[in-house]
Amino acid sequence: MSHLVLDRLSMRFHLPGGPVEALRDVSLSLPRGEMLAVLGPSGCGKTTLLNIVAGFLAPTEGQVTLEGRPVTGPGPDRGMVFQQGALFEWMSVADNVAFGPRMKGMARRERGDLVEHLLEQVGLAGFGSKAVYELSGGMQQRVALARCLAGDPAVILMDEPLGALDALTREKMQGLVLRLWRETGKTILLITHSVEEALLLGARLVVMAPRPGRIHRDEGLPFAAMGAEGGDLRAVKREPAFAERREEILSLIWDMEEEIMGRAGGAA
């Protein structure tokens, strides 16, 4: 049995201007421990798909199952990392990370040990007493990752988690995500607009077609494993195979965007 199954998902929104079909017949099966990157042109339903898996939206058709159990709403078995950290500004770094375990009733000492371990794991040892607003954007995303891991979810859902960071910080965070994936063995579903990031972090890549969102391409990639094994990410990006695949996927996405613009122009 696959760990996470998306079975023939379709999603239609009924808006004042008329119905919008965001997804049509999307099916995916993820084994435990897989890192899946989902890529596609704007408006192809990537975030809608993630929100259905998170339980924030109920699909019009189809269902999501995790370990054979239907997903009917949000739950602790799925952790979410947003583009912005969505942290509690009035809490310290340590209190943010400890929030989930505290809600579960974990003992104070055990909770403290867990927070200390996770902050060290994400490179924030010694920052537990800091206020969130004292941290840079990259550091806040590290806190968000630690808070997600503190809940020990079976699946980590990432919605453009590095999109708001500068280029250098983003590259460092990509390395951190790969290291955490290797160390924790978590199943990770990552949404990104960056072709390079999708190739670098996705052990498997799904490219979605324009609305209604459908799976256009589904393939395995070797680059995440290369980076997760401690390889230099910049060296991975310099690999001829990486550059070739990047140009191929960029051209594919570009053609899709052109198709969307053509439709819009025709409608106008």
Image: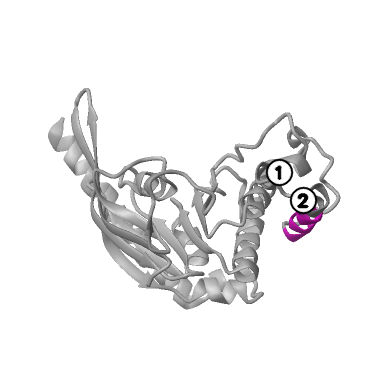
- Whether tag 1 and tag 2 are in contact, CB under 8 A, the answer is yes
Which image quadrant for residue 229? bottom right
Q: Please, is residue 140 above or below residue 18 in the view?
A: below
Disc number for residue 102: 1
- Residue 196 x %, y %: 48, 60
Give how far apart the Cα atoms at labels 1 and 2 are: 7 Å
Name the colouring of the figure: one colour
| Residue ID for mark 2 | 111
**What amino acid is labelled 1 in the image?**
Arg
- Residue 120 x %, y %: 78, 58
- In the displayed image of the protein, which residue is found farthest to the top? 16
Classify residue 103 as left or right of residue 185: right
User: What residue sits 51% from the left and 66% below the top?
Assistant: 200
The answer to which of marks 1 and 2 sits earlier in the sequence is 1
**What amino acid is labelled 2 in the image?**
Arg
- Residue 264 x %, y %: 20, 36
Image quadrant occupied by the C terminus: top left
Label 2 crowd (10 A; few <14 / some 14-19 / many >=20): many
Classify residue 69 as left or right of residue 202: left
224 and 110: which is toward the camera = 110
Query: Would you say residue 238 is visible in this rendering?
Result: no
**Magenta stretch encompasses residue 114:** yes
- In the displayed image of the protein, which residue is found farthest to the left? 266
User: What residue sits 41% from the left and 45% below the top?
Assistant: 55
Q: Which residues are magenta?
A: 113-121
260 and 71: which is toward the camera = 71
- Residue 95 x %, y %: 75, 40
**Magenta stretch encompasses residue 232:** no
